[in-house]
Image (cartoon, grey):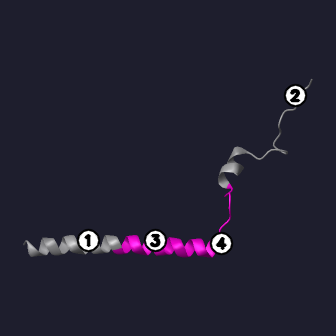
Amino acid sequence: MKESIPTATNKPSRAEKVMKPKHEAPEEKQLIGTFTLVLLIGGFLLATWFGVFSLYLNRL
C-alpha cells in the first residue's frame, strides 16, 4: 500500500490553525471592552501615583 503525503493544498498549516480564532466576536464590541479595561487600569495607576505623591508631600 502506498501512503499519501499531506500537501499544503489539502491541509492548513500550523500557523493558520494558531492564528484563526475558534469563534469570531464582533470587532467593535471587543474594542469597546479593551478601551474600558485600559481606562480602568489607567485610572488605577493615576490614583495610586497621586496617593503616593500626596504621602510624599505630607511627609516633607
Q: Amino acid at mark 2?
A: Glu
Secondary structure character of the magenta stretch overall = helix
Of pointers 4 and 1, the one earlier in the residue sequence: 4
Q: Which residue is mark 3?
A: 37
Quadrant of the rendered structure where residue 26 is? bottom right
Q: Can you tell which mark lies on residue 26? A: 4
> Would you say the residues marked 4 and 1 are in contact, meaning their CB atoms lie under 8 Å apart?
no
Q: Can you tell which mark lies on residue 8? A: none
Of pointers 3 and 2, the one earlier in the residue sequence: 2
Quadrant (top left/top right/bottom left/bottom right) for the C terminus: bottom left
Question: In x, y percent, where is residue 44?
Answer: 33, 72
Of pointers 4 and 3, the one earlier in the residue sequence: 4
Magenta stretch encompasses residue 49: no
Q: Amino acid at mark 4?
A: Pro
Q: Which residue is mark 2?
A: 3
Q: Residue at x 85, y 45 (%)?
A: 10
Q: CA distance from mark 4 to mark 3?
A: 17 Å
- Residue range in magenta is 20-43
Question: In x, y percent, where is residue 24?
Answer: 68, 65
Q: Can you tell which mark lies on residue 49? A: 1
Quadrant (top left/top right/bottom left/bottom right) for the N terminus: top right
Q: Residue at x 38, y 72 (%)?
A: 42
Q: CA distance from mark 3 to mark 2?
A: 52 Å
Q: Is residue 2 left or right of residue 30?
A: right
For the residue labelled by badge 1, is the local secondary structure a helix, a strand or a loop? helix
Q: Residue at x 44, y 71 (%)?
A: 38
Of pointers 2 and 4, the one earlier in the residue sequence: 2
